[in-house]
Amino acid sequence: MAKINEAKYIWMSGKMVPWNEAKVHVLTHALHYGSAVFEGIRAYRTKRGTAVFRLKEHMKRLLDSAKIYRMESPFTLEELMNATVELIKINELDECYIRPLLYRGYFNLGVNPMECPVEVSIAAWKWGKYLGPEALEQGVDVMISSWNRMAPNTFPAMAKTTANYANAQLIKMEAVVYGFSEGIALNAYGTISEGSGENIFVVKDGVIYTPNLESTILPGITRLTVIEIAKSLGFEVKECFIPREMLYIADEIFFTGTAAEVTPIRSVDKIVIGEGKIGPVTKRIQQEFFRIIEEADERYEHYFTWVK
Ligand code: PPE
């Protein structure tokens, strides 16, 4: 992977700070105890200008994640949304990935985070294809991880906390070391949860399945979008528990995520899925996803927050 594509400014608790000066103290609470929540958002260049995709839903999820961890955001939903738009403008980005972070800052150490101030940063930069340049067309090869997702009532999966990504890193590193693009984790019940940074969908006999919220997943905003798109195209979508072996006999499988967008999976544990390339249902949904964004389809106006 190439080095991060530096932009000019990072928004830090209300100020536009030059990229190289956007620093924290080494005793920042979040650095020691995973006391941070974050988001990943994309802004796209559409035919009607640059727009942030589902910004409100992402910022709501950020504040929900904070609430679960008893963190009070010093900024409102509207302030965070406005800061994001201002940041994209000042950096003169026409498309980018956006990373808001709410974290416990510098004051004292010890597990109890309550006295540490809650700080907020938002960064934006250009980020290419998450699972490699050919992933969207060719599909990716994945493995079932030997690591499970968190058990219920341990680390809440519905909170997008940095702490959850310790588990995600174990899943991702194992997959990469073994020569795969990504790992899929089972949950504590032994059924499918999600990839290290993506939700998962399975197509079997024309029906689309995706793990339910009880399966230990992040409630993905791309997942939600894809469910809406699939239903609008006339597909039946079932949110349910999915057994591991259902992946092997699926007609198609694909990942969804802000970074991964809609990425087909062509093999799992070296078992070829369907024809071993992007399948017709995945293709239809992927095309519709990118069409809505490229055209900034007015029927989906609520998906877009305009930058210019
Ligand atoms: N599950 C996990 C564990 C996850 O991290 C993501 C996003 C998703 C599902 C999909 O959620 P959504 O983006 O709302 O559709 N992962 C983010 C971070 C990836 C990273 O490497 O960092 C992302 O895609 O931005």
Image (cartoon, rainbow, N blue to C red):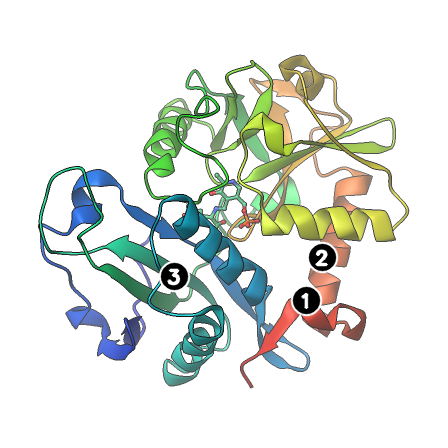
In the picture, measured across the screen, residue 12 lies left or right of residue 54, that is: left
- In this view, 16 is above or below 131: below
**Quarter of the C terminus within the rendering:** bottom right
- What is the spatial separation of the Cα atoms under label 3 and label 1, in whole angstroms? 22 Å
Label 2 sits on residue: 289
Q: How would you rate the neighbour count of disc 2 (Cα within 10 Å): few for under 14, some for 14-19, many for 20 or more?
A: some
Tell me the SS state at disc 3.
strand
Q: At 36% across and 62% down in the image, what residue appears?
A: 73
Counting from the top left corner in percent of width and height, residue 302 is at 69, 70
Q: At 56% across and 13% down in the image, what residue appears?
A: 190
Counting residues from the start of the chain, the first of labels 2 and 3 encountered is 3
- What is the spatial separation of the Cα atoms under label 2 and label 1, in whole angstroms? 7 Å
The disc labelled 2 sits on which kind of residue? Phe
Label 1 sits on residue: 293
The disc labelled 3 sits on which kind of residue? Pro
Q: How would you rate the neighbour count of disc 1 (Cα within 10 Å): few for under 14, some for 14-19, many for 20 or more?
A: many
Counting from the top left corner in percent of width and height, residue 27 is at 9, 50
- The disc at residue 100 is 3
Of 214 and 227, the residue lying toward us = 214
Tell me the SS state at disc 2.
helix
Residue 192 in sight in this render? yes
- In this view, 163 is above or below 29: above
Asked if marks 3 and 1 touch (Cβ < 8 Å), the reply is no
- In this view, 106 is above or below 163: below
Asked if marks 2 and 1 touch (Cβ < 8 Å), the reply is yes
Q: How would you rate the neighbour count of disc 3 (Cα within 10 Å): few for under 14, some for 14-19, many for 20 or more?
A: many
The disc labelled 1 sits on which kind of residue? Ile
Which one is closest to the eye, mark 2 or mark 3?
Answer: 3
Q: At 69% across and 29% down in the image, what residue appears?
A: 276
In the picture, measured across the screen, residue 160 lies left or right of residue 35, that is: right
Counting from the top left corner in percent of width and height, residue 110 is at 12, 39
Tell me the SS state at disc 1.
helix
